[in-house]
Image (spheres, rainbow, N blue to C red):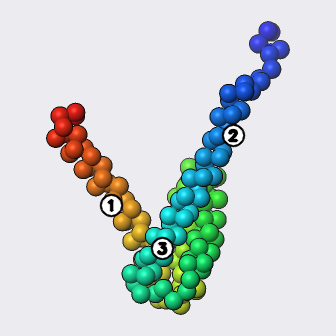
């Protein structure tokens, strides 16, 4: 019966950590947004489609991030959010830059492939570096 009378009280340390977690997640979201805008605009320049400013690219990316609201759905939300945001990027590129549909669809996939490729090879090279140093 004594356990029922106890109230759950947040400690100061817990409250500060929650506030810091919230601020850091917003900062990481902003950094990922800027990173994706720059990469997408670079890909448009590579495909020689850069007839609009970076403002239009940032609008497309910001609107496409609304697809990540589906991440709140348990189990399948992250997959649905990812697919929806890629669809929004492709549709935005197609309508804003007047490009063909297949180019608008393939640009986000190329970006994702390059990012995953770089991260996977950086992990492999770091592992080989550790092997050469004798630390692994």
In this figure, which residue is indicated by the disc labeled 1?
117
Residue 129 screen position, x and y as percent: 22, 44
Q: Position of residue 44 (x, y in %)?
A: 45, 81
Q: Is residue 100 visible?
A: yes
- Observer-nearest residue: 95 or 80? 95
Q: Nearer the viewer, residue 71 or 120?
A: 120
The residue that mark 2 highlights is 19
Up/down of 109 relative to 74, above or below: below
Q: Residue at x 80, y 9 (%)?
A: 1
**Viewer-side residue, 128 vs 117:** 128
Point out the tag, 3 or 1, that comes first from the N-terminus.
3
Question: Picture quarter containing residue 95?
Answer: bottom right
| Marks 2 and 3 close (CB-CB < 8 Å) | no
Q: Which residue is mark 3?
A: 40
Q: Quadrant of residue 56?
A: bottom right
Q: Position of residue 47 (x, y in %)?
A: 40, 84
Label 1 secondary element: helix
Decide: few, some or many residues near mark 2? Use Cα within 10 Å; few <14, some 14-19, many ≥20: few
Cα–Cα gap, marks 3 and 1: 16 Å
Which quadrant would the C terminus be assigned to in this image? Answer: top left
Q: CA distance from mark 2 to mark 1?
A: 34 Å
């Amino acid at each position: 019966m004594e356990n029922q009378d106890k109230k759950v009280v947040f400690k100061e340390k817990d409250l500060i950590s929650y506030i810091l977690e919230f601020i850091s997640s917003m900062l990481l979201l902003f950094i990922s947004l800027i990173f994706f805008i720059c990469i997408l605009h670079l890909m448009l320049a590579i495909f020689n489609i850069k007839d609009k400013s970076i403002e239009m690219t940032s609008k497309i990316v910001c609107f496409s991030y609304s697809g990540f609201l589906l991440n709140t759905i348990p189990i399948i939300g992250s997959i649905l959010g990812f697919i929806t945001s890629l669809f929004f990027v492709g549709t935005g590129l197609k309508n804003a830059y007047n490009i063909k549909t297949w180019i608008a669809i393939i640009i986000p996939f190329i970006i994702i492939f390059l990012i995953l490729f770089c991260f996977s090879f950086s992990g492999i090279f770091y592992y080989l570096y550790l092997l050469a140093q004798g630390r692994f």
